[in-house]
Every structure is written in structure tokens, then in C-alpha cells.
């Protein structure tokens, strides 16, 4: 789905229903069950727990929205913390209610995957052979390659931002590409990109020019250690000087056109 349509998919709708279901669950626990099988026994105690849970959820939501890579990453984080908050309140209200929510969460985890971004982009998708050829070309073209894996949530969350950047910044001398290290992990190792979930190196963005690596996120040191990557659009633009490259090319083009008119 494109920019908006993916947010209407079952993954988002069912997660939203979890939050909307809480008032009904609360009514059932208080009026049908009479708060007989939980940690609280009065409405004032319930309200106290709700204030703490939803206040904390509100703070986390604001922080995650400010630090978001994309709306996909924001909603993923929000839904996770929201479900924790609802589960805790369900346990406080009634243990049986908590078990029902846990069962629903398990079913959703198995059946509902977060939709992938499928909007406009200007990526070249590489195979091992074409990647080797592209990064070693000395043709004056810079290539920003995203090493990703289909199973990695951070890669999925970065897709909208990278797609938007590829549309905005692709030029004759600056291209964007993607390489699936989940499919070809041995190739990733050659570029010091580990597919291990523990390594936390996915996605890795590497800028190549003239057969050489110019920059990367996250940065890897000679001893193999690395700095945790920052993947907001403004961090990527700054890290690879995308605005600087664009301005310099526009200036050079303007000078050439000015010379032609003389």
C-alpha cells in the first residue's frame, strides 16, 4: 500500500481496537464481575491505576513521536506500549480478563504483520554480482546503499524515510540502492554488516564512490565496535551531507548554464 492506505490495514485496525476495547473490559470487570478477581476492589483504586498507566503511556507517546524515524516506527512503538498498559490494567481488574487479552495478543502476533511501505521510491535493487560491480565503478557517481533484511523491524520502519529521500535526492551523480543481507548474509560480512539480531547493525547505510566507502551509518571502528545508528531523516541528510551535495550540484549547473548564455 502507499502512503496512507497501509495505515488502514488489519494490523493497524486491530491494534486500535485493543485500546477501544478497554472501556468495555473495564465495565465488565466492575459491573459484571464486581472486581472480585483482581488487585483492586474499589473504583477509586481503578482510577488511580488508570491515571498512572495512561499518564506514562502519554509521556512515552510524545517522546516516541518526537524521535520517530517514520509513522510506521511510531505506531509500532505506540502499539507495543499501549498493549502493555492495557494488559497491566486488565490484570489489575481481573486475572481472567488479563488471560483473554494475552490470548488475543498472541493471535495478533502470529497472524498480523505490520504492512510494508510500497509508495514512490528510486531504488536500485542489487544482487551480489551487481552490488560488487556498482560499488567498484569509478564513474563519478555516489551510491548510497541500504543493507537490509525483510525480517528486521527497524528496516521496515526506515523504508518510508529512505524512499522519500531517494525520490528527493536522486541525481545523475547520486543514486540510491538496496541490498538484502538477510538473503545473502555472506556478502554483508564482506562489508562489515552483521545480520545478527544481537549486533543491532540493521539497517546499515553505506555511501560508496569510486570503489571506496565514504561514510556509513552506523559507523564501525577498526576493532569491530560501532556507534548506534541514528536513522531520522535529518540524521541521514546530515550524515551523508545530502543537502550539501544537492546545493553544490545546483550551483555548478547554474554556472554551466550561465556560461552557455554568454
Image (cartoon, helix red, strand yellow):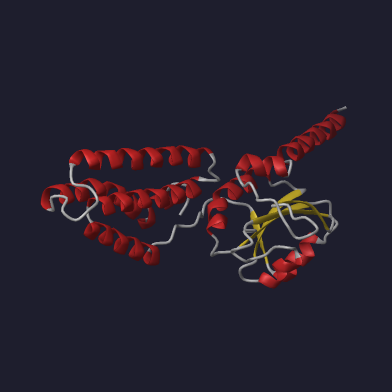
The image position of residue 78, as x and y in percent, is: 42, 47
Nearest the eye: 156 or 54: 54
Q: Nearer the viewer, residue 21 or 37?
A: 37
Q: Quadrant of the N terminus?
A: bottom left
Q: Quadrant of residue 10?
A: bottom left
Q: Residue at x 70, y 63 (%)?
A: 193
- Looking at the rendered structure, the number of numbered marks drawn on it comes to 0
Residue at 64% x, 48% y is: 166
What is the quadrant of the C terminus in the image?
top right
| Lateral position of residue 238 relative to residue 53, left or right | right
Given residues 163 and 24, the one toward you in this image is 24
Residue lying at the far top of the rendered structure: 262
Answer above or below: position of 21 versus 106: above
Nearer to us in this view, 137 or 32: 32
Instruction: Give x and y (percent) for residue 156.
Output: 53, 56
Q: Residue at x 65, y 51 (%)?
A: 228
Amino acid at each position: 500500500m502507499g502512503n496512507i492506505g497501509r495505515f488502514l490495514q488489519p494490523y493497524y485496525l486491530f491494534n486500535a481496537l485493543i485500546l477501544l476495547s478497554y472501556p468495555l473490559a473495564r465495565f465488565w470487570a466492575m459491573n459484571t464481575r464486581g472486581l472480585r478477581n483482581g488487585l483492586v476492589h474499589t473504583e477509586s483504586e481503578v482510577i488511580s491505576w488508570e491515571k498512572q498507566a495512561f499518564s506514562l503511556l502519554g509521556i512515552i507517546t510524545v517522546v516516541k513521536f518526537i524521535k520517530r524515524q517514520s509513522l510506521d516506527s511510531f505506531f509500532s512503538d505506540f502499539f507495543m506500549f499501549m498493549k502493555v498498559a492495557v494488559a497491566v490494567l486488565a490484570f489489575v481488574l481481573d486475572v481472567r480478563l488479563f488471560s483473554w487479552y494475552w490470548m488475543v495478543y498472541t493471535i495478533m502476533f502470529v497472524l498480523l504483520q505490520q504492512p510494508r511501505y510500497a509508495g514512490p521510491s528510486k531504488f536500485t535493487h542489487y544482487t551480489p554480482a551487481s552490488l560488487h560491480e556498482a560499488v567498484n565503478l569509478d564513474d563519478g557517481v555516489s551510491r548510497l546503499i541500504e543493507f537490509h533484511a525483510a525480517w528486521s523491524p527497524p528496516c521496515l520502519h526506515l523504508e518510508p524515510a529512505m524512499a522519500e529521500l531517494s525520490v528527493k535526492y536522486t541525481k545523475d551523480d547520486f543514486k540510491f540502492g538496496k541490498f538484502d543481507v538477510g538473503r545473502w548474509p555472506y556478502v554483508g560480512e564482506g562489508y562489515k554488516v552483521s545480520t545478527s539480531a544481537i549486533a543491532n547493525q540493521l539497517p546499515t547505510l553505506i555511501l560508496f564512490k569510486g570503489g571506496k566507502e565514504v561514510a556509513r551509518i552506523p559507523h564501525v571502528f577498526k576493532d569491530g565496535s560501532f556507534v548506534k545508528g541514528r536513522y531520522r531523516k535529518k540524521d541521514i541528510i546530515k550524515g551523508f551531507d545530502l543537502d550539501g551535495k544537492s546545493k553544490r550540484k545546483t550551483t555548478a549547473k547554474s554556472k554551466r548554464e550561465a556560461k552557455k548564455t554568454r
